Image (spheres, helix red, strand yellow):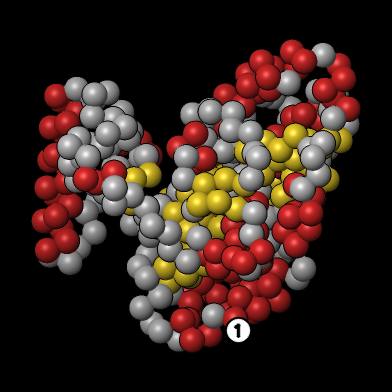
Amino acid sequence: MNPKLDYLNFLQSNEKYINDKSNFIVVAFYKFFELQNLEEFKDILRLIFNDTLVKGTILLAKEGINGTIAGMPSEIKNVLDELWNLDNLNDLEAKYSLAPQNPFFRMKIRLKKEIVTLGIDNISPKKEVGKYIKPENWNSFISDESLILIDTRNDYEVSIGSFDKAINPNIKSFREFPNWVSKNLLNKGSEIKKKKIGMFCTGGIRCEKSTSYLKSLGFEDVYHLEGGILKYLEKIPENETKWNGSCFVFDYRVSVKHSLELGDYDMCFACRMPINDEDKKNKYYIKGQSCHHCFTRSNVKQKQRFKERQKQIEIAKKKNQSHIGQPNSKDKF
């Protein structure tokens, strides 16, 4: 689909919410393409975002771009138009959702070795990739009893939602996926490479790279969900779903449900695990400091640091400011 038309369709279908100036548009996107001069491209992006209030995180690597940004509708439109005007991004597709506040606190553009870290050299969806299954066809696809369906996300993501009968590799990061493949697929003999395998992830980037990895190993019949879980939840009505639970997202919304509405989870800012209202009743839950997942794993010094950080966040909230020390992925112990 034409990416600009896709965005217009989103605006039209959410017109009453977008006209409410308290809502922000969240845009998730990625594209695999050959990117040589990273610093130059980073400077171009900086110019696009410098004079806006759009916030988020964009990763750049020689293999392409991966990002999520959020802002008011007028600024998001301007930013997207600028991105689509760039030669390598004129066909950049995205997933759109709404949030009652900006889920990011700053705009970050980072240079990385990979836009999604598998840790295996020379694996690129630009070379070879599995077959795409559109969200509208996913339900019938995963109904095939012979299918090996694999959730390529991290364990804490899978803990709050997944598809029926999907295998959970129980990995803590995508970098562990090749080791899981070695221990759980390759050790079953050469016949496993002829099996029908389907994979999925949040927005499509990890399952694209994982299908590319399996193809490099000689797996023949490999598929993945086009646009990931986010596109599935956007396109498929809740009364037709094969999805159970919520979908974890890497921002302060924590999770989303069908139609990409806000989910029912918060986050423990000490360990980044999703937690619900029941988890908050646990004796080990202390807002901003610990939960039942991590209370016994953090030491006294770490707990004190989390406590002080939470204090500063509360002070900033009272002053109607965003505290620069808001938790991020580096805060996990």
Residue name at image x 46 percent, y 45 percent: 160
User: Quick one: label 1, few (<14), some, or many (20+) residues within 10 Å?
Assistant: few
User: Is residue 52 visible to the viewer in this orientation of the structure?
Assistant: no
Q: Residue at (15%, 25%) from the top-left corner?
A: 301
In the figure, residue 119 lies in which quadrant?
top right
Q: Quadrant of residue 87?
A: bottom right
Q: Which one is nearer the viewer's eye here, 90 or 154? A: 154
User: Which residue is found at the position 28% from the left and 30% from the top?
Assistant: 294
Residue under numbered circle 1: 12
Residue 59 position (above or below residue 101): above
Residue 79 position in % (x across, y down): 54, 69
> In the shown orientation, is residue 34 left or right of residue 71?
right
Instruction: Locate residue 38, reporting x and y percent.
Output: 59, 43
Q: Where is residue 67 in the image (x, y as percent from the top left)?
A: 54, 52
For image coordinates 33% across by 49% down, the residue present is: 276
Q: In this view, does 224 lie to the left or right of 248?
A: right
Horizontal side, residue 202 vs residue 287: left or right: right
Residue 76: x and y in percent read 51, 71
In the rendered image, which quarter contains the C terminus? top left
> Which amino acid lies under the numbered mark 1 shown in the image of this protein?
Gln
* SS of the residue under disc 1: helix
Q: Can residue 225 be seen in this view?
A: yes
Q: In this view, does 180 lie above or below 52?
A: above
Image quarter (top left, top right, bottom left or bottom right) of the N terminus: bottom right
Q: How many labels does the image show?
A: 1
